[in-house]
Image: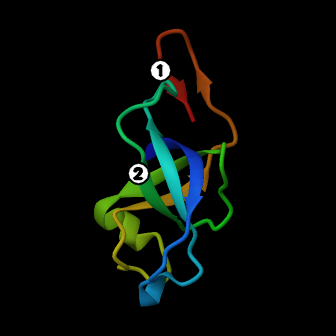
Amino acid sequence: MFLGKVTGRLVASVVYEGLQGVPLLWVQPLDKTGVEKGEPIVCADGTRMAGPGEIIYWEASREAALTLDPSYVPVDHAVVGIVDDLNIDSTGEGES
């Protein structure tokens, strides 16, 4: 699983049959210390509860497709959950 910060929402003009009602979110990937890493991505929100400003954890590839119901829908990234707290110690080894 990976960390990310939701920066916005998207609206699709055409929606795949298995993705009706699944929010699409702009997510900025974060490293384990909470620092931005790489380019923003689009995540299907399997929790249907994440919103802008929230720290989330997400999956990619096949695991992302398995997180949604029905599974195996065509997504590359999917939100798995919302992070309540992120504790990072001085060595950068933290728990989420």
The front one of 63 and 20 is 20
- Please tell me how crowded label 1 is: few (under 14), some (14-19), or many (20+) other residues with Cα within 10 Å: few
Local secondary structure at mark 2: strand
Quarter of the image for residue 71 reads: bottom left
Q: Amino acid at mark 2?
A: Ile
Q: Amino acid at mark 1?
A: Glu
Q: Is residue 82 above or below residue 68?
A: above
**Coloring scheme used:** rainbow
Mark in front: 2 vs 1:
2
Local secondary structure at mark 1: loop
Q: Earlier in the sequence, mark 2 or mark 1?
A: 2
- In the picture of the structure, the residue carrying the numbered disc 1 is 93
* Residue drawn where x is 53% and y is 24% of the image: 94
Q: Residue 83 got which mark?
A: none
* Residue drawn where x is 49% and y is 74% of the image: 12
Q: Position of residue 17 (x, y in %)?
A: 44, 90
**Which quadrant: the C terminus?**
top right
Quarter of the image for residue 20 reads: bottom right
- In the picture of the structure, the residue carrying the numbered disc 2 is 41
37 on left or right of 55: left
Q: Position of residue 67 (x, y in %)?
A: 46, 69
Give the Cα separation between the discs numbered 2 and 1. Answer: 25 Å
* Residue drawn where x is 47% and y is 53% of the image: 58
Q: Position of residue 1 (x, y in %)?
A: 42, 48
Identify the residue at the far bottom of this view.
17
Q: Position of residue 55 (x, y in %)?
A: 61, 42
The front one of 46 and 16 is 16
- Please tell me how crowded label 2 is: few (under 14), some (14-19), or many (20+) other residues with Cα within 10 Å: some
Q: Is residue 31 above or below residue 80?
A: above
Q: Is residue 43 above or below residue 39?
A: below
The front one of 52 and 48 is 52
